[in-house]
Amino acid sequence: MTHHINQTIVLYFVLFLSGVAGLGCEMVWTRMLMVGLGHEIIAVLSVVAAFFSGLALGAWALDRKISQSHKPEIWYAALECSIGCWALLLTIFIPAVNATAHYLIGVDPSPFRHWTFAFLLPFVLLLPATFSMGATLPAIERSFVRLRSNARPIGGLYAANTCGAVMGTLATTYLLVPSLGFNKTSVLLAVLNFACSGLILLRPARITASAGSRMSSMAYQPPSFALLGIVLLTGFLGIGFEVVVIRVLSQVFENTVYSFASILSVYLLGTASGAALYQVHAPQTAYNKTLHYLLSATSALCLVSLIVLYGSDAIYTAARSAAGSNFFGSLTGEIATAGLVFFLPCTAMGATFSHLAQTASTIRGGMGRALGLNTLGASLAPILFGIGLLPLLGSKNTLLIISCGYALLALVINIRKAAPVLLIALCALLIFFSPVQLQFVTVPDGGSIREHREGVMAAVTVVEDAHGDRFLKVNDKFQMGSTAGAFVDKRLAHIPLLLHAHPDTVLFLGLGTGTTFAAAAEHPRLRAEGVELIPEIIPLLHHFQKSTGEFSVHQNLHISIADARRFVNAATQCYDVIVADLFHPARDGAGALYTAEHFTAIKARLAAGGLFCQWLPLYQMDAETLRVIIRTFLRVYPHASAYIACYSLDMPVLGLVGAQSPLRYAADWYEQRVQTNSLRISLQNLRLPDIYELLGCFIAGSSDLALFAGSGPLNTDDKPVVMFGAPRSADAADRPAYETLFTLLTASRPKPAQVLALAHNEQQAQAHQRLADYWLARDSFLRAGAGMRRPQNPGEFLARIREPLLACVRKSRDFAAAYNPLLALAHEIYRTDPSAARELLVALEDAQPASERARMLRKKLFPENQ
């Protein structure tokens, strides 16, 4: 008896380790393949479907062979060795396949071509491993049955394996990949596979006489078609439930790499709990009655989860507030919310699968076929639910269909016990006709929702505030631009374009509201290509015509829906300028747009003399994340420089500009570059009227950037430091938005010779001095504004800013950012305090005698004093 107990513990432990390695590998391989296939929903779902398809094929194909084998532990050991060996080879194969995938899929593939390669490439590449993974649980189950012939072990074995999967998900995401990178993590997981193989072989195999004789005397018989049909449908509905709920929660959670790991862990933990409960409490008989109750319970609990989802935003907010408004608080809120939504229905799903698999598994085998069909259903669910039903019916109705699907299966099992099913149907009907939707959008006071689209990738919303300004939101958490921010968005296009002598082609990676992209149309003869990942954004761009104008009238603007990395690698055209949008570094997938490999691919797409500008949202990253990105950028563009987009302290934006050689400009560069009146007027409206306002945005050269970045790890595809590091600092609520900018300003000592041609005469020397004065005024202006909030009383505001801004005006005759507010404030307070207005205008004249605007306004407001 003691021997059997020890053997049982070994089998459970081996399955636990196998689960750790299996889910760890799935997490690693899926993210590695996204680099080549793209982050479009087609690629994401295809990788998942390919992974599950391989599992299904292995479980189904090897079921009979393993069941008839006298030594299933040998099969298991061979399968784990196969997985481990292939995991090692994939560290070489996946990067090679990623490079090939870009060209096979192409820049603008047809849906058929995209689906075909996005599915076939990962399916074939992962098949040796996934095929073996699919048969490991059936092999262990056969070993267990030979050890204890009267046991019904599947619930316990499945629970142990799934608990290992929970550990694999968490360990891979929180510890292994951030510390080791993808390749070394794959090697470590392969070692676990080899350890599982060794443990099962070292275990002394003893088979009870009754079990051995019965197995050798009975022919193999597969489970019934009815049973297998239910197994298939429950796998389909279970993963469909996961896919839809994750899409709903993406409107509530922070959507970092840790968000998905938290959700998946809760889902798996619930499944493991259900399997364990079934192992302990399941009846040995009454198959149909037990299955009917399990299916009915799953259906009812799916409805309960749907109701809980309505309050998920409030639950998450309350849990996060209680735990703290930081990274730990976000994780706590996500896990707590996911637990309330997922745990109970997943517990029922785990018990249901264990019951089905145990029923299918006899002394003659069959468990592998049941697992294979369940996994096959799971492979179909992401595509049919994620791309088919969810965008068509909405998340609420799709979840109702899933719940009713379980209820219908329960009714088929036992039509005489229809009362619970009818009650579930009634509840589903009430929810269907309720006006409440699973739509989470924060609307400002007095604002409204102009349009909302629940697409396959994200929920995208156009919100209008009380002032008539419109904002583009993705999953409510990410603001992708607004009409109120058009001033800055247009500068994001014009600054890098003006730094190039004669750009003919420009590529924009990321569109947002389209304002930055549309600004390219103001440059004569410039052809612009815009790439946007989220297809639901494109039909909403018309809401922002106040900032963009009508896209259809600009024949030189073209939009493509594609993953930025795949587009850059697959493109054959070279561009004079490439501009990358503000990618929130903490957002899941965005870190891949800051890797050395991506920057290198962009460099290959630059024409001779071309430049690349990567805009960075400093208000969404800490200094350490900025250092990693700059360090990585400098590795590819050693002559890089940094420019600030505008002088906002609430949302500071930094641009890293890379070129093949240092960028230096003559004092008359601007006049030579801007030769059309329409462009000149547009630039004046954006406060870019001359060379000093343009180069005044210069923050640091390559030497200062290198000193600031220091030594440390790069952000690479193998070790994505930004993906795992940025979310840990993104939620620091007590950090001012301008803190990271000031850290860089303090470390930088810009010199005019870094951007202006060497001074050979007095006029050029004056240009150098004027630029140095501009930077001095700019930095003083920024520091004066730190922490300052405008009171409602104009007089009080004037008292606060008068002297700091006048000091900036005295330092530079070109720095209008300090002059203009004082001029506007003088006009504003004229009606309530004319003497203060006149005094301010006189002070402006004294501080900046070269400017006529203060003198002209004073003459206009006080003609009697002239």
Image: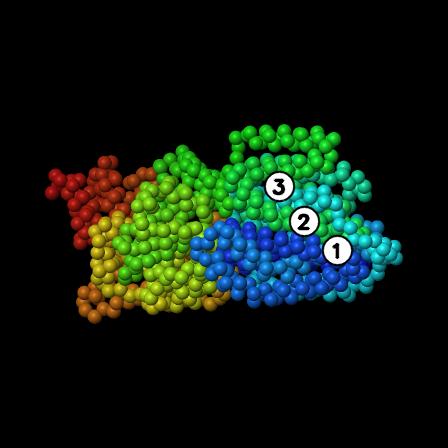
Please indicate whether residue 797 sits to the left or right of residue 191 in the image: left
Q: Is residue 721 visible?
A: no
Residue 487 percent across, percent down from the top left: 32, 48
Residue 754 percent across, percent down from the top left: 31, 66
Residue at the spot of label 2: 373
Q: Residue at x 42, y 66 (%)?
A: 636
Picture layout, residue 11 above or below residue 854: below
**Residue farthest right in this picture:** 209
Please indicate whether residue 400 sits to the left or right of residue 648 in the image: right
Q: Residue at x 63, y 45 (%)?
A: 236
The number of callouts visible is 3
Tag 2 secondary structure: helix
Q: Residue at x 59, y 50 (%)?
A: 262
Residue at the spot of label 3: 340
In this view, the mark in front (3 or 2)? 2
Q: Residue at x 60, y 46 (%)?
A: 381
Disc 3 marks a residue whose amino acid type is Leu
Residue at the spot of label 1: 64
Q: Are marks 2 and 1 in contact (CB under 8 Å)?
A: no
